[in-house]
Image (tube, rainbow, N blue to C red):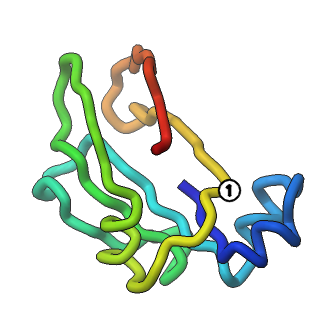
Amino acid sequence: MVFLPEADAQRLKGAGIRKLLGSDAARVLVYVWGGNHGRSKVLGSPYLGARGKTVVLRNAGTGSHSENVNLSSDYKRAFGGAKGAVVGIAISADSDDTNTKVRGAISNLSLN
């Protein structure tokens, strides 16, 4: 999830992801399944420095799962303050160091 203060979001409306992420005001929350950290643990980002944080939803494993997150609460825990505008959502999978394949589906995604 990519967040910007409301004024920056309006100014950058229609901009590509690189321009959004290039803003010093951008903050990124990455939700993950995987690793060995405990649920809800907030980790630093090796790619975004202080502008990015990772929130662990569950450890690595298989199966079907449903998740609900509170963006405002998670943002406050990760960065402090109010979250501003959501300007980007990305979904990805990564199995390159597991010698396996990933198959997934997303359904009923909603932002409230």
Q: At x 25% / y 43%, what residue is drawn?
A: 34
Image point 44% across, 55% down: which residue?
A: 30
Q: Is residue 93 left or right of residue 7?
A: left
Residue closer to the observer: 38 or 27: 27
Query: Is 89 on the left-hand or right-hand side of 19?
Result: left
Q: Residue at x 23, y 47 (%)?
A: 57
- Tell me if residue 74 comes above or below residue 26 in the rendering: above
For residue 83, side relative to residue 6 (left or right):
left
- Residue 85: x and y in percent read 62, 64
Q: Is residue 26 left or right of residue 58?
A: right
Mark 1 residue element: strand
Reading the image, the residue beneath label 1 is 87
In the displayed structure, 49 sits above or below 21; it is below
Which of the two residues, 12 or 82, is positioned nearer the viewer here? 82
Check disc 1 and give the amino acid type.
Val
Other residues around mark 1 within 10 Å, as few (<14) / some (14–19) / many (≥20): many
Q: Quadrant of residue 13?
A: bottom right
Residue 101 horizontal/vertical position (percent):
39, 18
Residue at the spot x=70%, y=83% of the render?
24
